[in-house]
Amino acid sequence: MSKLLSVDNLSIQFGGLKAVDDVSFHINKSELLGLIGPNGAGKTTVFNIISGFYKADSGKINFEDQDITEANAAEVNHFGLARTFQNIRLFKTLTVLENVLMALQQRKHNGSFKDWFSSLLNTKSHQQLELNLKLEALELLKIFELDTFAQEEAGSLPYGAQRKLEIVRALATKPKLLMLDEPAAGMNHQETQELNELIRFIKNKFNLTILLIEHDMKLVMNICDRIVVLNRGKKIADNIPYEIKNSPQVIEAYLGKRKHE
Amino acid sequence: MKKYLIFLVSVIVLGVVLNFFMNSYIQAVFISFMINAIMALSLNFITGLADQFSLGQAGLMAIGAYTSAVLNKEFFNNDWTMIPIGVLAGAFMAAGAGYLISLPSFRLKGDYLAIVTLGMAEIVRVVLLNWNHVGGPRGYNAITKFPEFYFSFGFAVLLLTFTFMTMYRLKFSWFGRNLWAINEDDIAAEVMGLNVAKTKRRAFVISSFFAGLGGGFYSHHLGYISPGSFGFIISVQILIVAVLGGLGSLSGSIVAALILTFLPEALRSVQTGSLDLRMIIYPILLIVMMIVRPQGLFGRKEISLSHFGLTKFKARGSNE
Protein backbone atom coordinates (compact mmCIF):
# COMPACT_ATOMS: atom_id res chain seq x y z
CA MET A 1 0.00 0.00 0.00
CA SER A 2 1.23 3.46 -0.81
CA LYS A 3 1.30 6.29 1.65
CA LEU A 4 -0.94 9.26 0.99
CA LEU A 5 0.00 11.37 3.95
CA SER A 6 2.94 10.95 6.23
CA VAL A 7 3.66 12.96 9.33
CA ASP A 8 7.20 12.77 10.66
CA ASN A 9 8.44 13.84 14.08
CA LEU A 10 5.88 16.60 14.44
CA SER A 11 6.29 18.86 17.48
CA ILE A 12 4.68 22.08 18.57
CA GLN A 13 4.96 23.97 21.80
CA PHE A 14 2.59 26.56 23.25
CA GLY A 15 4.49 28.41 25.95
CA GLY A 16 5.64 25.74 28.36
CA LEU A 17 3.22 23.13 27.05
CA LYS A 18 4.37 20.56 24.53
CA ALA A 19 1.02 20.09 22.83
CA VAL A 20 2.41 17.72 20.22
CA ASP A 21 5.63 15.92 20.96
CA ASP A 22 7.50 14.07 18.25
CA VAL A 23 4.44 12.46 16.66
CA SER A 24 4.85 10.38 13.52
CA PHE A 25 2.20 8.45 11.64
CA HIS A 26 1.06 7.89 8.09
CA ILE A 27 -2.14 7.21 6.20
CA ASN A 28 -2.30 4.77 3.33
CA LYS A 29 -4.40 5.35 0.25
CA SER A 30 -8.12 4.65 0.78
CA GLU A 31 -7.60 3.92 4.42
CA LEU A 32 -9.81 5.13 7.24
CA LEU A 33 -7.53 6.16 10.06
CA GLY A 34 -8.85 7.07 13.47
CA LEU A 35 -7.03 9.53 15.69
CA ILE A 36 -8.11 9.16 19.31
CA GLY A 37 -6.95 10.09 22.75
CA PRO A 38 -8.21 11.58 26.00
CA ASN A 39 -9.13 15.26 26.25
CA GLY A 40 -6.17 17.52 25.66
CA ALA A 41 -4.12 14.79 24.02
CA GLY A 42 -3.33 17.04 21.06
CA LYS A 43 -5.57 15.50 18.41
CA THR A 44 -7.06 18.74 17.16
CA THR A 45 -3.64 20.39 17.34
CA VAL A 46 -2.26 17.73 14.99
CA PHE A 47 -5.24 18.41 12.75
CA ASN A 48 -4.60 22.11 12.79
CA ILE A 49 -0.94 21.65 11.93
CA ILE A 50 -1.72 19.36 9.01
CA SER A 51 -4.41 21.68 7.68
CA GLY A 52 -2.08 24.67 7.84
CA PHE A 53 -3.44 26.67 10.75
CA TYR A 54 -0.44 26.17 13.01
CA LYS A 55 3.17 26.05 11.98
CA ALA A 56 4.96 23.10 13.55
CA ASP A 57 8.11 23.87 15.51
CA SER A 58 9.75 20.86 13.95
CA GLY A 59 8.81 17.90 11.83
CA LYS A 60 7.66 17.30 8.29
CA ILE A 61 4.34 16.63 6.61
CA ASN A 62 4.30 14.98 3.20
CA PHE A 63 1.24 14.59 1.05
CA GLU A 64 1.61 12.52 -2.11
CA ASP A 65 5.38 13.05 -1.93
CA GLN A 66 4.97 16.81 -1.75
CA ASP A 67 6.14 18.71 1.28
CA ILE A 68 3.17 20.61 2.70
CA THR A 69 4.73 21.55 6.03
CA GLU A 70 4.91 25.23 5.17
CA ALA A 71 1.62 25.48 3.26
CA ASN A 72 -1.15 27.68 4.68
CA ALA A 73 -4.76 26.57 5.04
CA ALA A 74 -5.83 27.64 1.56
CA GLU A 75 -2.82 26.02 -0.11
CA VAL A 76 -3.30 22.81 1.83
CA ASN A 77 -6.79 22.62 0.40
CA HIS A 78 -5.44 22.97 -3.12
CA PHE A 79 -3.14 20.01 -2.51
CA GLY A 80 -6.26 17.92 -1.95
CA LEU A 81 -6.92 17.94 1.77
CA ALA A 82 -10.29 19.05 3.10
CA ARG A 83 -11.40 19.26 6.70
CA THR A 84 -14.43 19.87 8.85
CA PHE A 85 -14.53 21.49 12.26
CA GLN A 86 -15.34 20.29 15.73
CA ASN A 87 -17.78 23.17 16.20
CA ILE A 88 -19.67 23.58 12.95
CA ARG A 89 -18.38 26.40 10.79
CA LEU A 90 -20.93 26.83 8.05
CA PHE A 91 -21.58 30.12 6.31
CA LYS A 92 -24.76 30.48 8.32
CA THR A 93 -26.67 33.18 6.45
CA LEU A 94 -25.77 31.83 3.04
CA THR A 95 -28.16 29.28 1.59
CA VAL A 96 -27.29 25.61 1.59
CA LEU A 97 -26.69 25.83 -2.14
CA GLU A 98 -24.41 28.84 -1.80
CA ASN A 99 -22.38 27.06 0.85
CA VAL A 100 -21.60 24.29 -1.59
CA LEU A 101 -21.18 26.74 -4.49
CA MET A 102 -18.61 28.69 -2.53
CA ALA A 103 -16.54 25.56 -2.10
CA LEU A 104 -17.04 24.42 -5.70
CA GLN A 105 -16.18 27.75 -7.29
CA GLN A 106 -12.69 27.87 -5.82
CA ARG A 107 -11.66 25.45 -8.57
CA LYS A 108 -13.61 27.16 -11.35
CA HIS A 109 -13.09 30.88 -10.78
CA ASN A 110 -9.41 31.61 -10.65
CA GLY A 111 -9.77 35.39 -10.46
CA SER A 112 -8.19 36.02 -13.86
CA PHE A 113 -9.01 39.16 -15.83
CA LYS A 114 -11.30 37.17 -18.06
CA ASP A 115 -13.06 35.90 -14.99
CA TRP A 116 -13.60 39.42 -13.67
CA PHE A 117 -14.84 40.89 -16.90
CA SER A 118 -17.14 38.05 -17.77
CA SER A 119 -18.83 38.34 -14.38
CA LEU A 120 -18.98 42.15 -14.62
CA LEU A 121 -20.51 42.04 -18.07
CA ASN A 122 -22.54 38.96 -17.18
CA THR A 123 -21.62 37.29 -20.46
CA LYS A 124 -23.20 34.14 -21.87
CA SER A 125 -20.21 32.02 -20.99
CA HIS A 126 -20.30 33.34 -17.45
CA GLN A 127 -23.99 32.53 -17.10
CA GLN A 128 -23.31 29.06 -18.45
CA LEU A 129 -20.48 28.55 -15.98
CA GLU A 130 -22.68 29.67 -13.08
CA LEU A 131 -25.46 27.36 -14.23
CA ASN A 132 -23.09 24.41 -14.46
CA LEU A 133 -21.76 25.16 -11.01
CA LYS A 134 -25.28 25.27 -9.61
CA LEU A 135 -26.20 21.99 -11.26
CA GLU A 136 -23.06 20.35 -9.93
CA ALA A 137 -23.78 21.66 -6.45
CA LEU A 138 -27.37 20.44 -6.60
CA GLU A 139 -26.24 17.03 -7.74
CA LEU A 140 -23.88 16.81 -4.81
CA LEU A 141 -26.64 17.90 -2.43
CA LYS A 142 -28.95 15.33 -3.94
CA ILE A 143 -26.55 12.50 -3.13
CA PHE A 144 -26.83 13.49 0.52
CA GLU A 145 -30.56 14.19 0.37
CA LEU A 146 -30.02 17.83 1.19
CA ASP A 147 -31.35 19.17 -2.11
CA THR A 148 -34.75 19.92 -0.61
CA PHE A 149 -33.06 22.46 1.68
CA ALA A 150 -31.07 24.04 -1.16
CA GLN A 151 -32.65 27.48 -0.86
CA GLU A 152 -32.75 27.57 2.91
CA GLU A 153 -30.27 29.32 5.10
CA ALA A 154 -27.59 26.95 6.32
CA GLY A 155 -27.97 28.20 9.89
CA SER A 156 -31.63 27.18 9.98
CA LEU A 157 -30.97 23.50 9.27
CA PRO A 158 -31.31 20.90 12.03
CA TYR A 159 -28.06 20.02 13.74
CA GLY A 160 -27.51 16.69 12.04
CA ALA A 161 -28.09 18.21 8.62
CA GLN A 162 -25.62 21.00 9.38
CA ARG A 163 -22.97 18.41 10.17
CA LYS A 164 -23.79 16.66 6.95
CA LEU A 165 -23.66 19.90 4.98
CA GLU A 166 -20.23 20.65 6.37
CA ILE A 167 -19.04 17.32 5.06
CA VAL A 168 -20.68 17.97 1.68
CA ARG A 169 -19.03 21.37 1.51
CA ALA A 170 -15.65 19.81 2.23
CA LEU A 171 -16.29 17.21 -0.47
CA ALA A 172 -17.12 19.97 -2.93
CA THR A 173 -13.47 21.00 -2.91
CA LYS A 174 -12.73 17.56 -4.42
CA PRO A 175 -10.28 16.33 -1.81
CA LYS A 176 -8.22 13.16 -1.82
CA LEU A 177 -7.99 13.16 1.94
CA LEU A 178 -10.93 14.15 4.09
CA MET A 179 -10.22 15.06 7.68
CA LEU A 180 -13.19 14.91 10.03
CA ASP A 181 -12.85 16.56 13.42
CA GLU A 182 -15.31 14.92 15.81
CA PRO A 183 -18.19 14.60 13.37
CA ALA A 184 -20.31 12.81 15.96
CA ALA A 185 -19.96 15.54 18.60
CA GLY A 186 -23.38 16.40 19.97
CA MET A 187 -25.15 13.64 18.10
CA ASN A 188 -27.49 11.12 19.69
CA HIS A 189 -27.20 7.38 19.24
CA GLN A 190 -29.29 7.17 16.12
CA GLU A 191 -27.61 10.12 14.45
CA THR A 192 -24.22 8.58 15.19
CA GLN A 193 -25.45 5.39 13.57
CA GLU A 194 -26.41 7.32 10.46
CA LEU A 195 -23.06 9.10 10.47
CA ASN A 196 -21.36 5.74 10.59
CA GLU A 197 -23.11 4.73 7.39
CA LEU A 198 -22.52 8.14 5.83
CA ILE A 199 -18.77 7.95 6.36
CA ARG A 200 -18.60 4.48 4.86
CA PHE A 201 -20.73 5.65 1.97
CA ILE A 202 -18.66 8.72 1.06
CA LYS A 203 -15.45 6.77 1.41
CA ASN A 204 -16.56 4.32 -1.26
CA LYS A 205 -18.49 6.74 -3.43
CA PHE A 206 -15.72 9.34 -3.74
CA ASN A 207 -12.82 6.93 -3.37
CA LEU A 208 -11.53 8.85 -0.38
CA THR A 209 -8.98 8.46 2.33
CA ILE A 210 -10.31 9.62 5.68
CA LEU A 211 -8.65 10.82 8.84
CA LEU A 212 -11.11 10.83 11.71
CA ILE A 213 -10.89 12.36 15.16
CA GLU A 214 -13.61 11.00 17.37
CA HIS A 215 -14.57 10.50 20.97
CA ASP A 216 -17.34 8.04 20.31
CA MET A 217 -15.44 4.77 20.77
CA LYS A 218 -18.17 2.64 19.28
CA LEU A 219 -18.05 4.62 16.07
CA VAL A 220 -14.27 4.60 15.91
CA MET A 221 -13.94 0.88 16.61
CA ASN A 222 -16.65 0.19 14.08
CA ILE A 223 -15.39 1.95 11.01
CA CYS A 224 -11.67 2.60 11.34
CA ASP A 225 -9.13 0.40 9.57
CA ARG A 226 -6.39 1.51 11.90
CA ILE A 227 -6.18 3.72 14.96
CA VAL A 228 -3.51 6.07 16.24
CA VAL A 229 -3.72 6.92 19.92
CA LEU A 230 -2.31 10.13 21.35
CA ASN A 231 -1.79 10.94 24.99
CA ARG A 232 -0.32 14.18 26.31
CA GLY A 233 1.03 15.03 22.89
CA LYS A 234 2.79 11.70 22.38
CA LYS A 235 1.80 8.78 20.23
CA ILE A 236 1.27 5.75 22.42
CA ALA A 237 -0.26 3.25 20.01
CA ASP A 238 -0.80 2.66 16.30
CA ASN A 239 -2.69 -0.51 15.47
CA ILE A 240 -5.88 -2.16 14.26
CA PRO A 241 -8.98 -1.48 16.39
CA TYR A 242 -9.02 -4.90 18.06
CA GLU A 243 -5.47 -4.52 19.33
CA ILE A 244 -6.12 -0.96 20.46
CA LYS A 245 -9.09 -2.13 22.48
CA ASN A 246 -6.93 -4.53 24.41
CA SER A 247 -3.80 -2.44 24.67
CA PRO A 248 -2.90 -1.86 28.34
CA GLN A 249 -1.23 1.45 27.47
CA VAL A 250 -4.38 2.81 25.85
CA ILE A 251 -6.58 1.65 28.69
CA GLU A 252 -4.19 3.27 31.11
CA ALA A 253 -4.26 6.54 29.20
CA TYR A 254 -8.05 6.63 29.32
CA LEU A 255 -8.81 5.09 32.69
CA GLY A 256 -5.61 5.27 34.69
CA LYS A 257 -3.51 2.46 36.19
CA ARG A 258 -5.04 -0.43 38.02
CA LYS A 259 -3.93 -0.62 41.62
CA HIS A 260 -1.84 -3.66 42.40
CA GLU A 261 -3.05 -5.73 45.28
CA MET B 1 -33.93 45.47 -22.21
CA LYS B 2 -37.19 46.99 -21.04
CA LYS B 3 -35.87 47.83 -17.61
CA TYR B 4 -32.90 49.71 -19.06
CA LEU B 5 -35.31 51.74 -21.18
CA ILE B 6 -37.45 52.56 -18.16
CA PHE B 7 -34.35 53.56 -16.25
CA LEU B 8 -33.11 55.78 -19.09
CA VAL B 9 -36.47 57.47 -19.54
CA SER B 10 -36.87 58.15 -15.83
CA VAL B 11 -33.37 59.61 -15.65
CA ILE B 12 -34.10 61.91 -18.58
CA VAL B 13 -37.43 62.96 -17.09
CA LEU B 14 -35.72 63.65 -13.77
CA GLY B 15 -32.98 65.61 -15.52
CA VAL B 16 -35.48 67.70 -17.45
CA VAL B 17 -37.53 68.41 -14.35
CA LEU B 18 -34.45 69.39 -12.36
CA ASN B 19 -33.01 71.46 -15.19
CA PHE B 20 -36.07 73.49 -16.08
CA PHE B 21 -38.29 73.51 -13.01
CA MET B 22 -35.90 73.58 -10.07
CA ASN B 23 -33.53 76.24 -8.84
CA SER B 24 -29.77 75.77 -8.79
CA TYR B 25 -29.83 75.09 -5.06
CA ILE B 26 -31.91 71.95 -5.41
CA GLN B 27 -29.86 70.93 -8.44
CA ALA B 28 -26.67 71.18 -6.41
CA VAL B 29 -28.15 69.20 -3.52
CA PHE B 30 -29.21 66.52 -5.96
CA ILE B 31 -25.69 66.16 -7.29
CA SER B 32 -24.38 66.06 -3.72
CA PHE B 33 -26.76 63.19 -3.11
CA MET B 34 -25.27 61.21 -5.97
CA ILE B 35 -21.73 61.84 -4.75
CA ASN B 36 -22.74 60.74 -1.26
CA ALA B 37 -24.32 57.65 -2.74
CA ILE B 38 -21.12 56.77 -4.59
CA MET B 39 -19.10 57.25 -1.43
CA ALA B 40 -21.53 55.18 0.65
CA LEU B 41 -21.48 52.42 -1.97
CA SER B 42 -17.71 52.36 -1.98
CA LEU B 43 -17.67 51.96 1.79
CA ASN B 44 -20.49 49.44 1.75
CA PHE B 45 -18.53 47.22 -0.59
CA ILE B 46 -15.68 46.79 1.87
CA THR B 47 -17.50 47.18 5.18
CA GLY B 48 -20.90 45.75 4.32
CA LEU B 49 -20.04 42.87 2.03
CA ALA B 50 -16.59 41.91 3.23
CA ASP B 51 -17.07 43.01 6.83
CA GLN B 52 -13.80 44.94 6.90
CA PHE B 53 -14.32 48.03 8.96
CA SER B 54 -12.75 51.00 7.13
CA LEU B 55 -12.72 54.55 8.41
CA GLY B 56 -10.43 55.93 5.73
CA GLN B 57 -12.87 56.61 2.95
CA ALA B 58 -12.38 60.38 3.18
CA GLY B 59 -8.64 59.96 2.64
CA LEU B 60 -9.20 58.00 -0.56
CA MET B 61 -11.80 60.55 -1.60
CA ALA B 62 -9.20 63.29 -1.07
CA ILE B 63 -6.69 61.47 -3.26
CA GLY B 64 -9.27 61.20 -6.04
CA ALA B 65 -10.36 64.81 -5.64
CA TYR B 66 -6.89 66.35 -5.66
CA THR B 67 -5.65 64.15 -8.49
CA SER B 68 -8.55 65.07 -10.69
CA ALA B 69 -8.49 68.77 -9.81
CA VAL B 70 -4.73 69.21 -10.24
CA LEU B 71 -4.70 67.20 -13.43
CA ASN B 72 -7.40 69.35 -14.97
CA LYS B 73 -5.82 72.64 -14.00
CA GLU B 74 -2.18 71.86 -14.71
CA PHE B 75 -2.40 69.66 -17.77
CA PHE B 76 -5.79 70.13 -19.40
CA ASN B 77 -5.96 73.95 -19.29
CA ASN B 78 -9.23 73.92 -17.39
CA ASP B 79 -10.95 72.19 -20.27
CA TRP B 80 -14.26 70.92 -18.90
CA THR B 81 -14.54 68.20 -21.53
CA MET B 82 -11.50 66.57 -19.92
CA ILE B 83 -13.20 66.26 -16.54
CA PRO B 84 -14.17 62.60 -17.05
CA ILE B 85 -10.55 61.68 -17.76
CA GLY B 86 -9.40 63.50 -14.65
CA VAL B 87 -12.03 61.80 -12.52
CA LEU B 88 -11.04 58.41 -13.89
CA ALA B 89 -7.38 59.17 -13.20
CA GLY B 90 -8.35 60.14 -9.66
CA ALA B 91 -10.12 56.82 -9.26
CA PHE B 92 -7.07 54.89 -10.44
CA MET B 93 -4.83 56.93 -8.19
CA ALA B 94 -7.05 56.13 -5.20
CA ALA B 95 -7.11 52.46 -6.20
CA GLY B 96 -3.32 52.45 -6.30
CA ALA B 97 -3.17 54.10 -2.90
CA GLY B 98 -5.73 51.59 -1.64
CA TYR B 99 -3.55 48.74 -2.86
CA LEU B 100 -0.50 50.11 -1.06
CA ILE B 101 -2.46 50.54 2.15
CA SER B 102 -3.97 47.08 1.88
CA LEU B 103 -0.58 45.37 1.69
CA PRO B 104 0.37 45.79 5.34
CA SER B 105 -3.02 46.52 6.90
CA PHE B 106 -5.08 43.53 5.85
CA ARG B 107 -3.34 41.33 8.32
CA LEU B 108 -5.51 43.18 10.80
CA LYS B 109 -9.20 42.78 11.51
CA GLY B 110 -12.10 44.73 12.90
CA ASP B 111 -11.26 47.72 15.07
CA TYR B 112 -7.55 47.49 14.32
CA LEU B 113 -8.16 47.80 10.61
CA ALA B 114 -10.45 50.75 11.28
CA ILE B 115 -7.67 52.50 13.17
CA VAL B 116 -5.11 51.84 10.43
CA THR B 117 -7.40 53.16 7.71
CA LEU B 118 -8.26 56.13 9.89
CA GLY B 119 -4.56 56.84 10.33
CA MET B 120 -4.05 56.56 6.60
CA ALA B 121 -6.77 59.13 5.95
CA GLU B 122 -5.16 61.49 8.45
CA ILE B 123 -1.77 61.08 6.76
CA VAL B 124 -3.32 62.02 3.42
CA ARG B 125 -4.99 65.05 4.99
CA VAL B 126 -1.85 66.25 6.73
CA VAL B 127 0.27 65.80 3.62
CA LEU B 128 -2.20 67.90 1.64
CA LEU B 129 -2.28 70.45 4.44
CA ASN B 130 1.48 70.95 4.15
CA TRP B 131 1.74 70.77 0.40
CA ASN B 132 1.93 74.38 -0.71
CA HIS B 133 1.73 73.63 -4.40
CA VAL B 134 -1.85 72.44 -4.02
CA GLY B 135 -2.78 75.30 -1.73
CA GLY B 136 -1.98 73.81 1.62
CA PRO B 137 -4.56 74.80 4.22
CA ARG B 138 -6.02 77.45 1.87
CA GLY B 139 -7.27 74.70 -0.37
CA TYR B 140 -7.34 74.35 -4.12
CA ASN B 141 -9.34 77.01 -5.89
CA ALA B 142 -11.21 77.60 -9.11
CA ILE B 143 -11.47 74.00 -10.24
CA THR B 144 -13.22 73.59 -13.57
CA LYS B 145 -16.91 72.88 -13.36
CA PHE B 146 -19.32 71.64 -15.94
CA PRO B 147 -20.79 74.66 -17.77
CA GLU B 148 -24.38 73.45 -17.66
CA PHE B 149 -26.38 71.55 -15.10
CA TYR B 150 -27.43 68.79 -17.47
CA PHE B 151 -23.81 67.89 -18.22
CA SER B 152 -23.11 67.68 -14.55
CA PHE B 153 -26.27 65.72 -13.90
CA GLY B 154 -25.67 63.32 -16.76
CA PHE B 155 -22.12 62.64 -15.67
CA ALA B 156 -23.18 62.09 -12.06
CA VAL B 157 -25.88 59.64 -13.12
CA LEU B 158 -23.35 57.86 -15.30
CA LEU B 159 -20.88 57.53 -12.44
CA LEU B 160 -23.51 56.39 -9.97
CA THR B 161 -24.93 53.84 -12.40
CA PHE B 162 -21.46 52.56 -13.20
CA THR B 163 -20.64 52.25 -9.50
CA PHE B 164 -23.89 50.57 -8.62
CA MET B 165 -23.93 48.14 -11.54
CA THR B 166 -20.31 47.08 -10.98
CA MET B 167 -20.91 46.41 -7.32
CA TYR B 168 -24.27 44.78 -7.92
CA ARG B 169 -22.79 42.37 -10.45
CA LEU B 170 -19.89 41.63 -8.17
CA LYS B 171 -22.13 41.12 -5.17
CA PHE B 172 -24.06 38.38 -6.92
CA SER B 173 -21.04 36.78 -8.57
CA TRP B 174 -18.38 34.36 -7.40
CA PHE B 175 -16.50 37.28 -5.91
CA GLY B 176 -19.49 38.38 -3.87
CA ARG B 177 -19.98 34.85 -2.63
CA ASN B 178 -16.38 34.75 -1.50
CA LEU B 179 -16.86 38.04 0.32
CA TRP B 180 -20.04 36.78 2.01
CA ALA B 181 -18.21 33.67 3.06
CA ILE B 182 -15.37 35.69 4.58
CA ASN B 183 -17.95 37.88 6.26
CA GLU B 184 -19.57 34.81 7.80
CA ASP B 185 -16.55 32.77 8.74
CA ASP B 186 -13.11 33.57 7.40
CA ILE B 187 -11.52 30.43 8.81
CA ALA B 188 -13.97 28.18 7.01
CA ALA B 189 -13.53 30.26 3.85
CA GLU B 190 -9.79 29.71 3.99
CA VAL B 191 -10.22 25.98 4.46
CA MET B 192 -12.28 25.91 1.26
CA GLY B 193 -9.11 26.98 -0.52
CA LEU B 194 -9.84 30.70 -0.74
CA ASN B 195 -6.94 33.11 -0.33
CA VAL B 196 -8.71 35.29 2.22
CA ALA B 197 -6.10 38.04 2.47
CA LYS B 198 -5.93 38.45 -1.29
CA THR B 199 -9.71 38.57 -1.62
CA LYS B 200 -9.96 41.26 1.07
CA ARG B 201 -7.22 43.28 -0.62
CA ARG B 202 -9.02 43.12 -3.93
CA ALA B 203 -12.26 44.23 -2.32
CA PHE B 204 -10.43 47.14 -0.74
CA VAL B 205 -8.85 48.18 -4.04
CA ILE B 206 -12.27 48.15 -5.71
CA SER B 207 -13.69 50.14 -2.83
CA SER B 208 -10.81 52.63 -3.10
CA PHE B 209 -11.35 53.00 -6.83
CA PHE B 210 -14.94 54.10 -6.37
CA ALA B 211 -14.07 56.34 -3.44
CA GLY B 212 -11.60 58.06 -5.75
CA LEU B 213 -14.26 58.28 -8.43
CA GLY B 214 -16.66 59.99 -6.05
CA GLY B 215 -13.92 62.28 -4.77
CA GLY B 216 -12.83 63.24 -8.27
CA PHE B 217 -16.29 64.32 -9.22
CA TYR B 218 -16.75 66.06 -5.88
CA SER B 219 -13.93 68.48 -6.68
CA HIS B 220 -15.50 69.44 -10.01
CA HIS B 221 -18.90 69.76 -8.46
CA LEU B 222 -17.89 72.26 -5.79
CA GLY B 223 -15.02 73.91 -7.64
CA TYR B 224 -13.10 74.22 -4.41
CA ILE B 225 -11.48 71.64 -2.17
CA SER B 226 -9.37 71.94 0.93
CA PRO B 227 -7.86 69.37 3.28
CA GLY B 228 -10.62 70.33 5.70
CA SER B 229 -13.22 68.90 3.29
CA PHE B 230 -11.82 65.42 3.88
CA GLY B 231 -11.55 65.21 7.64
CA PHE B 232 -12.44 62.33 9.90
CA ILE B 233 -16.00 63.57 10.17
CA ILE B 234 -16.53 62.96 6.45
CA SER B 235 -15.49 59.31 6.84
CA VAL B 236 -17.99 59.03 9.66
CA GLN B 237 -20.75 60.65 7.62
CA ILE B 238 -20.13 58.18 4.83
CA LEU B 239 -20.29 55.39 7.38
CA ILE B 240 -23.59 56.73 8.73
CA VAL B 241 -25.11 56.63 5.26
CA ALA B 242 -23.92 53.07 4.64
CA VAL B 243 -25.11 51.86 8.05
CA LEU B 244 -28.48 53.55 7.74
CA GLY B 245 -29.10 51.97 4.35
CA GLY B 246 -28.03 48.61 5.68
CA LEU B 247 -24.53 47.16 5.55
CA GLY B 248 -24.53 44.83 2.60
CA SER B 249 -27.45 46.47 0.80
CA LEU B 250 -26.27 48.48 -2.18
CA SER B 251 -29.65 49.94 -3.05
CA GLY B 252 -30.05 50.71 0.64
CA SER B 253 -26.97 52.94 0.45
CA ILE B 254 -28.51 54.95 -2.36
CA VAL B 255 -31.82 55.39 -0.55
CA ALA B 256 -30.02 56.35 2.65
CA ALA B 257 -27.86 58.84 0.76
CA LEU B 258 -31.03 60.38 -0.66
CA ILE B 259 -32.58 60.70 2.79
CA LEU B 260 -29.47 61.93 4.57
CA THR B 261 -28.64 64.49 1.90
CA PHE B 262 -32.09 66.01 1.63
CA LEU B 263 -33.15 65.74 5.26
CA PRO B 264 -30.66 68.27 6.68
CA GLU B 265 -31.50 70.60 3.80
CA ALA B 266 -35.22 70.22 4.34
CA LEU B 267 -34.80 70.83 8.06
CA ARG B 268 -33.11 74.16 7.38
CA SER B 269 -36.53 75.72 6.91
CA VAL B 270 -37.62 74.53 10.36
CA GLN B 271 -35.06 76.82 11.92
CA THR B 272 -36.91 79.09 14.35
CA GLY B 273 -35.13 82.12 15.67
CA SER B 274 -32.02 81.32 17.60
CA LEU B 275 -33.08 77.71 18.16
CA ASP B 276 -31.62 75.47 15.47
CA LEU B 277 -34.07 72.58 15.43
CA ARG B 278 -32.15 70.92 12.62
CA MET B 279 -29.41 69.82 14.94
CA ILE B 280 -31.97 68.29 17.28
CA ILE B 281 -34.27 66.58 14.83
CA TYR B 282 -31.54 65.05 12.69
CA PRO B 283 -29.73 63.16 15.47
CA ILE B 284 -33.01 62.08 17.04
CA LEU B 285 -34.07 60.59 13.73
CA LEU B 286 -30.82 58.68 13.53
CA ILE B 287 -31.17 57.38 17.07
CA VAL B 288 -34.76 56.28 16.52
CA MET B 289 -33.68 54.61 13.32
CA MET B 290 -30.95 52.65 15.09
CA ILE B 291 -33.39 51.52 17.78
CA VAL B 292 -36.17 50.51 15.43
CA ARG B 293 -34.04 49.01 12.67
CA PRO B 294 -30.53 48.27 13.91
CA GLN B 295 -29.73 46.41 10.69
CA GLY B 296 -30.41 49.54 8.62
CA LEU B 297 -33.25 50.30 6.24
CA PHE B 298 -32.83 47.24 4.07
CA GLY B 299 -30.59 44.96 6.10
CA ARG B 300 -28.71 43.09 3.42
CA LYS B 301 -31.49 42.97 0.88
CA GLU B 302 -31.72 44.74 -2.44
CA ILE B 303 -34.63 46.51 -4.03
CA SER B 304 -35.21 44.76 -7.30
CA LEU B 305 -34.75 47.18 -10.18
CA SER B 306 -36.78 45.05 -12.54
CA HIS B 307 -40.06 46.40 -11.19
CA PHE B 308 -39.79 50.10 -11.07
CA GLY B 309 -43.24 50.93 -9.85
CA LEU B 310 -43.52 48.01 -7.49
CA THR B 311 -40.68 47.87 -5.05
CA LYS B 312 -40.11 44.18 -4.80
CA PHE B 313 -37.70 42.79 -2.29
CA LYS B 314 -35.37 40.01 -3.18
CA ALA B 315 -34.93 37.49 -0.43
CA ARG B 316 -31.22 37.64 0.11
CA GLY B 317 -29.14 37.34 3.23
CA SER B 318 -30.83 37.45 6.58
CA ASN B 319 -30.86 39.78 9.54
CA GLU B 320 -34.60 39.81 9.13
Image (cartoon, rainbow, N blue to C red):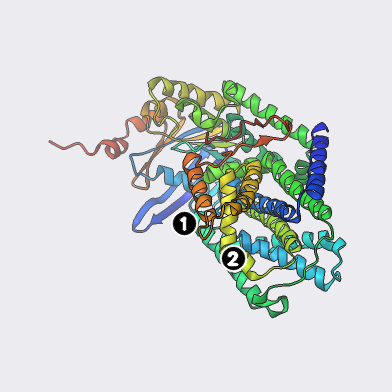
**Rendered residue at 87%/66% (across/down):** B79
**Disc 1 designates what residue?**
A58
**Rendered residue at 65%/24% (across/down):** A139
Image position, residue A176 (x, y; %) = 60, 36
Q: Quadrant of residue B208?
A: bottom right
Quarter of the image for the C terminus of chain A: give it. top left
Give the secondary structure at mark 1. strand
Which residue is the extreme one toward the left? A261
Image position, residue A165 (x, y; %) = 54, 29
A196 relative position to A244: left or right:
right
| Mark carried by residue B231 | 2
Quarter of the image for the N terminus of chain A: give it. top right
Q: Are marks 1 and 2 on the same chain?
A: no
Amino acid type, callout 1: Ser
Which residue is the extreme one toward the bottom? B132
Give the secondary structure at mark 2. loop
Q: Subunit of mark 1?
A: A
**Rendered residue at 25%/36% (across/down):** A255
- Along the viewing direction, whichever of A205 and B134 lies nearer the viewer: B134
Image position, residue B86 (x, y; %) = 80, 63
* Cα–Cα span, label 1 and label 2: 50 Å
Q: Quadrant of residue B219?
A: bottom right
Does A1 appear above or below B167? Answer: above
- Along the viewing direction, whichever of A68 and B95 lies nearer the viewer: B95
**Foreground: disc 1 or disc 2:** 2
